[in-house]
Image: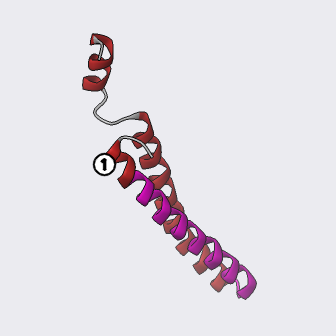
């Protein structure tokens, strides 16, 4: 390991890949929370098709967040996939 690589690692306590997964996971979490509001709005508008679509999209994001979390755990343990 070169001095430059050692310096970069000490300046960046997490890898770019870990950061990327954390960022995506954070964004998915925000989206999942936002869907609750969208579902309520659709319910108040009396639009069951919209309620169902938002629920479907929310569930898809939940599943994606779970997959991202599994990848993040592996990257944090092994440094890569």
Q: Position of residue 71 (x, y in %)?
A: 44, 54
- Residue at x-position 51% and y-position 69%: 62
68 part of magenta stretch = yes
Look at the picture and state if 3 lies above or below 42: above
Return the residue at label 1: 77
Q: Position of residue 48 (x, y in %)?
A: 71, 88
Res 17 quadrant in image: top left
Q: Is residue 4 left or right of residue 68?
A: left
Prevalent SS, magenta region: helix
56 part of magenta stretch = yes
Q: Nearer the viewer, residue 56 or 39?
A: 56
State the quadrant of the N terminus: top left
- Residue at x-position 43% and y-position 34%: 16
Look at the picture and state if 47 lies above or below 69: below
Res 59 quadrant in image: bottom right
Q: Position of residue 23 (x, y in %)?
A: 46, 46
Q: Is residue 50 left or right of residue 61?
A: right
**Element on which disc 1 rests:** helix
The residue stretch that appears in magenta: 45-72
């Amino acid at each position: 390991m070169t001095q430059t690589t050692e310096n970069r690692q000490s300046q960046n306590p997490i890898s770019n890949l870990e950061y990327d997964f954390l960022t995506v996971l954070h964004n998915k979490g925000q989206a999942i929370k936002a869907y609750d509001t969208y579902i309520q709005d659709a319910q108040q508008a009396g639009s069951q098709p919209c309620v169902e679509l938002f629920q479907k999209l929310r569930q898809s994001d939940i599943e994606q967040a779970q997959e991202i979390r599994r990848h993040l755990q592996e990257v944090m343990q092994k440094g890569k996939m």
